[in-house]
Image: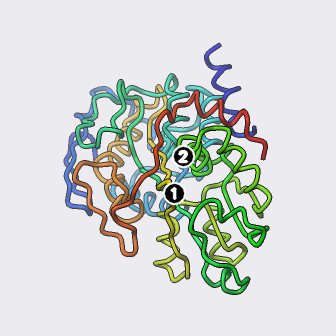
Amino acid sequence: MKKLFAVLLIMTLVLSCVAGVCAEGVSGKTFEAPAMPEGLDDSSNKVVIYSGAEEYRNEYFLKRINEAFPDYDVTIEYMPTGNLAAKLAAEGTDTDMDIFYDLDFSYAGLVEQYLADVSAYDQSIYVPDCQIENAHYLAATRNGGAIIVNPDVLAEKGIEEPTCYEDLLKPEFKNLISMPSPKSSGTGYMFVKSLVNAWGEDKAFEYFDGLAENILQFTESGSGPVNALVQGEVAVGLGMTAQAVTAINDGANLKILFFEEGSPYSLYGYAIPEGKQNRKAVVDVFNFFYTTLVLEDKELYYPEQVFVDQVNNIENYPTDIQYADMHDNTTEEKARLLDNWEY
């Protein structure tokens, strides 16, 4: 019954280093994984990872894993976070997935009955809101959102830069805004939740009814708005700060804005499906994420705070970000709110 509930609920949301060895990441921090359990199955060197991270991050992870474990056969397949959760909920422990990476906490909480216990991993390395009680998944990413604009498109259309959410309702923005669908993207949902918390549910949903009139497309993935901005297809995107910074550092003319309500954010984690923790290759790779790759991901791509004393060193990344109120960001609340989402 629990499995059926998880499948139905998630489908509603979608559709409606080696163990025991210290490793030093590029940030200079050093973490240590628990000692490797005895008697692990070493008969297979194949590890299948499903990841909600962008392709460039997945390519980096795979490169580093292959360097650390040249004898392992590791694949990383991109899958949007909602689809990833739905896959695990449908398959349970009978899945080809050995590890998942970058799954929204609210989804991870819904499928945690299918996840191996990882409470042996030291969570004192994390800031308080990234520590999970009775852990079946560990923190990987704080994904902050922003209003991102393409100044060239604004100038071409003769539109002034928006200064608040209400500006995006102006008729001149018709078909010039991109936003991820909150039903398939954690990025889309965090904008909905932040305005529900800031304004109240009725006003927030009334706002999105108006905003939908100006949306060119509700994208399936959180990457969609920044991609559309880079291509000049829209003037404004409700998207990820980190992706905007990456595009800017690659030469795109984009600008990152934060409105009075603050930067919405989601927390994302990684885990091992139950049963897969009995395989040595899987544990080796999972430990490499814990000791090394999550650190390097913060240093190179997503620097918003997950670890204690974490420093943001990425060029053009905003500092002193004021975050939105994201309280009550639970699986049940997400399901309830998205049940009322019509787009």
Q: Which residue is depicted at the point 46% across and 37% down?
A: 327
Helix, strand or loop at label 1? It is strand
| Residue 315: percent from left, percent from top | 36, 75
**Type of the residue with mark 1:** Gly
Q: Nearer the viewer, residue 16 or 26?
A: 16
| Residue 301: percent from left, percent from top | 41, 64
| Residue 233: percent from left, percent from top | 73, 74
Q: Quadrant of the N terminus?
A: top right
**Type of the residue with mark 2:** Ser
Relative height, residue 317 to residue 331 (above, below): below
Query: Are the residues flagged by discs 2 and 1 in contact, CB closer than 8 Å?
Result: yes
Quadrant in the rendering for residue 7: top right
Say few, some or many: other residues with alpha carbon within 10 Å of mark 2 (under 14 / 14 to 19 / 20 or more). Answer: many
Whole-angstrom CA distance, mark 2 to mark 1, is 10 Å
Say few, some or many: other residues with alpha carbon within 10 Å of mark 1 (under 14 / 14 to 19 / 20 or more). Answer: many
Residue marked by disc 2: 194
* Image mark for residue 145: 1
Q: Nearer the viewer, residue 60 or 139?
A: 139
Earlier residue among tags 2 and 1 = 1
Quadrant in the rendering for residue 211: bottom right
Q: Which residue is depicted at the point 72% across and 62% down?
A: 169
Which circle, 2 or 1, is nearer the viewer?
2
